[in-house]
Amino acid sequence: MLEQLRYIRPRRIYTPTSVLEAHVAVIKGERFHAIIPAAEAPDNTECYSNLDMWPGLIDLHIHGREGCDVIDGKLSSIETISTSLLKHGVTGFLATTVTTTWPQTIAAMKVIGAAYKQKMPGAQVLGGYSEGLFFSEKHKGAHNEAFFKPLDEALIDEMISAADGALKAVALAPEKANGVKMTQYLSKHGVRVMLGHCDADFAQTNAALAHGACGGVHVFNGMRGIHHREPGCAGALLLDSQALVEVIADGIHLHPAILQLIYRLKGQHKVALISDCINAGGLKDGEYQLGEMPVVVKDGVAKTHSGSLAGSTLTLEKAVKNLAELANIPLLEAINMASLVPATYLNMDNELGSIEVGKIAHFSLLDDAFQVQHANLFGKQIF
């Protein structure tokens, strides 16, 4: 029996390099089969004249949503996060931990490893991301320094082993003892190193980048900023042509002018939009817990009792909208920063991250208000 083709005609199709109107995406099984002119489409074409087709978004840095957190160490929590993310056009994510006790960290890594090997009900788990433990106190943000650990080979090995192939990235402060050595060690084991929650200066950051570090954790936040006599960690990350920078485009973490500055220095290929969303995402204002840290959410902004920003309640499609509207960045490029750029970072751009023939058909259909109306996984409409 021949596999039936599915034809979808939205108002616009956002491919990696162009915005197509009067075109139809053809899906065969789980993959994009062709993109054809609308004039060639058959009568059974699904038409969405007021909706735009975006590729499935990929959130490289997210802790939780709707009352659930990756650090819960429960598969049910990751499934809830997965389902919630799909409502916002996210079809893949790195399940991100936060600073807590070592036993809880290892338990969470084991669950991430299990989730990585299964099909999730919504956004797929593309791996795990350790944000926490290996930081410095000066820029700790919403991380409890009581649980910080030294950069130690045995601890790294235990974390890698617990995740069972799922650990894709580890955030660390490069100025800590063994910073460069452990950067090399993690890189040798196929784990990307991201620099953040640190007081590293320009030279220390460049040393880590030269020895395998891939980029920076939510750039400017949780790191030494730019001073005219000491460019700091932020300056080094922005000037290194190969370094990827995570950006939280919620209009709170970064001023619109700084979003423009980042874009001008990094271009569209080295900026990854992230949500850094915590378990309060999708819920009302109130009191929450981020790992071992109490957090208060007011007007959608999450802060610790000391006033530090504590992640966000952002969703990735809103980050795209904000980047386009606040920083005047072309919408197509902003979409790529939340899809193709993260897929490339994960070395998965041959399968994910864009609407192209041969790739897995993860995509969503959005209205003029950037609201996701329909989401599709593996070529099938989920809602």
Image (cartoon, grey):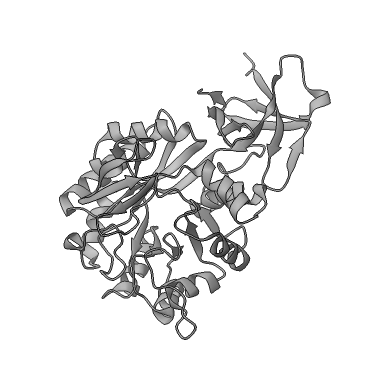
Residue 70 rendering spot, x and y as whole percentages: 30, 42
- Is 1 or 270 nearer to us in this picture? 270
Residue 46 rendering spot, x and y as whole percentages: 68, 19
**Of all residues shown, which one is farthest toward the right?**
39
- Position of 284 relative to 341 (above/below): above
- Whether residue 119 can be seen here: no
Residue 321 rendering spot, x and y as whole percentages: 58, 45
- Is 204 or 255 nearer to us in this picture? 255
Left or right of 370 in this view: 300? left
- Whether residue 118 can be seen here: yes
* The N terminus, quarter of image: top right
Residue 177 rendering spot, x and y as whole percentages: 26, 75
Q: How many marks?
A: 0
Residue at 58% across, 66% down: 261
Residue at 20% across, 51% down: 292
Residue at 42% across, 78% down: 207
Give residue 158's quadrant in the image.
bottom left
**Of all residues shown, which one is farthest toward the front?**
299
- Is 183 or 308 nearer to us in this picture? 308
- Position of 96 relative to 203 (above/below): above
Left or right of 337 in this view: 289? left
